[in-house]
Amino acid sequence: MAYFDLETNPTTSIKSKSSDGKKSIDVSNFRPVNKKPIGNDWDVKPGDILSWSDYRSSNTYFVTGQRRLRKNRDTSGSGYLTIPLSITRLFPSALTHYGPFLEAEPDLVAIIELPPTDGIFAERFGSPLPETICNRNDIQFLVNPMDNMLFVSINGEDSDGFPIDGTKTEEIIEPEKISKWPQVAPSSLPIGWTRKSCGCMVGGADYISGTWKFEGPETKKDEAYKIVEKYYDEFDVQINWETDSS
């Protein structure tokens, strides 16, 4: 990846693709705006960082896969970079892709948002995340490169940090078993199937007890069975399947 300081050097930083990088493109009059397309001849790639900032990363943008600008969303509130999920998911391993930049600018990136399929889990933690976790959309994986820590956010609530050096994937997903319970029941059911609570639920810090009923057309019952049984796998749950004739 490449980092372009266009605030300091707007006339020669960006090269022309059509000239094989021999000529520069003057972007002095280019006004960056979120989602704005960049020039077709700009020799930049998805994931590259374009900075018009005079202080930290207050006016910095990422190049998206559609060659548009994606403005830095400063989650730190202090002008640091947050590399968003929409950018990191473009690469097999975000830390590998941005490694040289992190070494050159160790105090500029506050957070790197990672997809659950990112290579960091196999490369640094020993094994990929299981499919059951990769398929969920309520979990965020965040790396703080300054502290060399991984954080897991579930439904917006952050966990304790996991050191990137010395942590195993099993240690990361173990708390996930408990955090799964507050969801109570799977939502990705086949078309026509519904879920509803039967009676009241009782819950504590690490458990929820209750009864849920799933109903739907007979033609989709096998698909519904698999989804529900997979969702509750490894938990102390009793599942009773009934049909209209039972």
Image (cartoon, grey):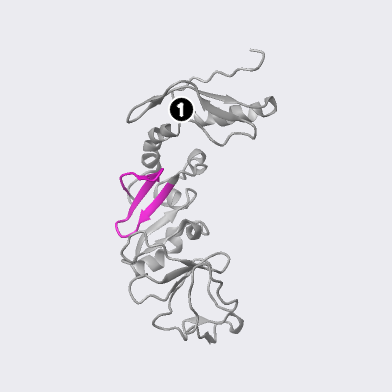
- Residue 161 position in % (x across, y down): 31, 47
Residue 143 covered by magenta stretch:
yes
Report the amino acid beneath label 1.
Glu
Q: Which residues are magenta?
A: 140-162
Q: Residues within 10 Å of mark 1 (few under 14, many from 20)?
A: few
| Image quarter hosting the C terminus | top right
Q: Residue at x 57, y 25 (%)?
A: 214
Q: Tell me, yes or no, if residue 164 can be seen here.
A: no
Q: Residue at x 33, y 60 (%)?
A: 76
- Residue 119 position in % (x across, y down): 47, 52
Q: Main secondary structure of the magenta part?
A: strand
- Residue 165 position in % (x across, y down): 33, 51
The residue at which mark 1 appears reads as: 234
Q: Tell me, yes or no, if residue 52 can be seen here.
A: yes
226 in relation to 154, above or below: above
Name, please, the residue furthest toward the front: 199
